[in-house]
Each structure stands twice: as C-alpha cells, then as structure tokens.
Image (tube, rainbow, N blue to C red):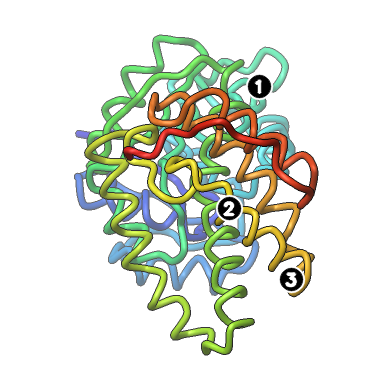
Amino acid sequence: MKPGIALIGPGRVGCAVSKRLFEAGYPLTAIISRKQQRAAEACSYLGCSTTLATDQIAAATTAEIILLAVPDDQIEDSAQNLQAAHHLSEQTTLIHFSGLHPAEIMRHNSSPVSLLSIHPLLPFADHEKAYESLNQCPCILESDPPRTVMLGEELIKAIGGHPFVLDSDKKPLYHAAACIASNYFVTLLASARDLLVTCGIESDRAISLLLPLVKASLNNINHFGPEQGLTGPIVRGDIGTVTEHIHALTKEVPELLQLYLEMGEATALIAGQSGRLDQESVAAFRHLFSAKGGDPAPLTGSSNSK
C-alpha cells in the first residue's frame, strides 16, 4: 500500500498535486487549513470525502508524507512549529513546493524526518488548469538527505511530471530563470498591449492581436532555439527603425522607454551571438541604447541577410 499523505495548505499548488497523487493511489489522511470550511471545500474538489478536513495541524502527524503547500515566507515557521509541537518519526517526509528555498529550511534541531522540495515548473493560475498542466510538467527536485530523491522521483512520476534533480545552492538562480521566463514575459506582453492601447486599440483586442505573434515566436524558439529563432529589426541590423521606436517612446510613452532600451541591448547581444549580426552593428545598437535615444554610432555596413 502506498504511504498516506496529509496536505497542509489547500491552495492551488497543494490541491493540484494532491489530486494527482490521490488519483494515483496515495491515500489522503488529512487536509488542513486555517479555516475548516476551506479544508472541506478542498476535500470536495479532490473527491476524497472520507479524508479528515480540519484546522488542527496535529492531524498531519499520522501521515508518512506531509505536503507543506504554504507561501514561501511561511515554510520555515510552519515546518519548525509542526516539528516542535508534535513528534514526527524517521519514516516521515516533509515536502515543500518552493522553487527558491532548499529543503533544509524545514530542518528542526535533530528531527529525524526526511526533507524534500518539489517545484513544478508551471504558472499556477487556478486549481483545474494547474491540475491539467501537471501532466508532462518538468519538476525540480532537491532533498536532504539525498536518498530521499528516490521518493521524490516516485511522487513526481505519480503526478505525471518529469523529475530533474537540482543542487540546493543553485535554486535562487533557477527560480530567477523561471521568474524571467514566466512573470517577466507577462509584464512584457502587458507593456506591448499598453502601447497598442495608446494607438487607439481596445485592450482586449490588443491582446488578441499580439497572441499569434507570441505563439509564432515561441514556436520558432522551440524549433530553432533563441539565437536562430530571433527575428525583427535588431537582428536585421535596421538601426533606423529602432531609432524611430526610441523617439516615439520618448515622446509618447516615456514610462516604457527604459524597458525598451534594456531589452534592446540584451537583444543586440543575442543577435550577435546568433552570427547573423556583425559585431560593428552590435556595438552601434549598444551605443544607441545606452545613449537613451541619442544619435546612433555611424555604421560602415551591417548584416541584413536574416
């Protein structure tokens, strides 16, 4: 029989993961929330009507696996308080879902429990979409002691994901990468939408106009990688077009100018790395972006076969 699981914190992540595990045959012994009504609603969503829904954290101690699905800044205190107030055996494994914090953050003195962190590389917008997206999802795995990795791999495969082991000291950089790829991507798209709104296009319509471009760009990256999938005026060496962008932003939407300049300089470097933009053109673009809209450095030639 598979080990019993208790869920502390029935939010989007906790419910999505727990539902997958429950369907894979892991019994849910308790669902714990600060509000008992929320725990009961989670039981209904998960389809585990016989599970104890409670606001008493002691109910978690009967499970071999405890899922601590609380916000990042509550993980340490929640784990410490649980272990200080209740005896947990060496057969117990505590699991958190932070992409930033190591499993060790849950360590309490000489507690014998095993510690594990699992981070599904997904944006958890709501329960159902997160539950569906867990299938084939990459999941970063980190544990203390390392032998607990085997359990983590079993759990990740049970929810339909693909485990990737990561050293604990690399988690901040890993999490920054995830933040750039997901959160900052949303910010960039919102900024592009706002520019179209400035052009007189309604907000909802602006998003629908941009999405085909975004999807095609993602498809290019998937097939060719970022360097060869890059398109647009910078990789074409079209410094005149970019100069016009900067002048228009400076005049009409100055609050987005700095974002454009910083992203432009990073894009020029990628264009150079692709081999499709010569280094003289890269230097000219970098001068333009650092000059904050000033005149570009003179070019004697540029690479335009993109």
Q: In which quarter of the image is residue 176?
A: top right
Which mark sits nearer the N-terminus, 2 or 1?
A: 1
Q: What element carries label 2?
A: helix
Residue 20 lies left or right of residue 67; in this view the side is: left
Task: List the residue tagged with mark 3.
Answer: 253
- 224 lies above or below 143: below
Q: What residue type is labelled 3?
A: Val
Rate crowding at label 2 as few (under 14), some (14 to 19) or many (20 or more) other CA atoms within 10 Å: few
Secondary structure beneath label 1: loop
Determine which of the numbered discs, if any, sits on residue 268 in the image: none
For label 1, count other residues whose C-alpha is less than 10 Å away and answer few (under 14), some (14-19) or many (20+). Answer: some
Q: Mark 2 points at which residue?
A: 240
Q: In which quarter of the image is the C terminus?
A: top left
Q: Nearer the viewer, mark 2 or mark 1?
A: 2
| Residue drawn 49% across the image and 11% down it | 145
- Residue under label 1, please give it: 107
**Does residue 278 lie above or below 182 as drawn?**
above
Which residue appears farthest toward the front when viewing the image?
300
Label 3's element? Answer: loop
**Quarter of the image where one finds residue 4:** top left
Q: Which of marks 2 and 3 is in front?
A: 2
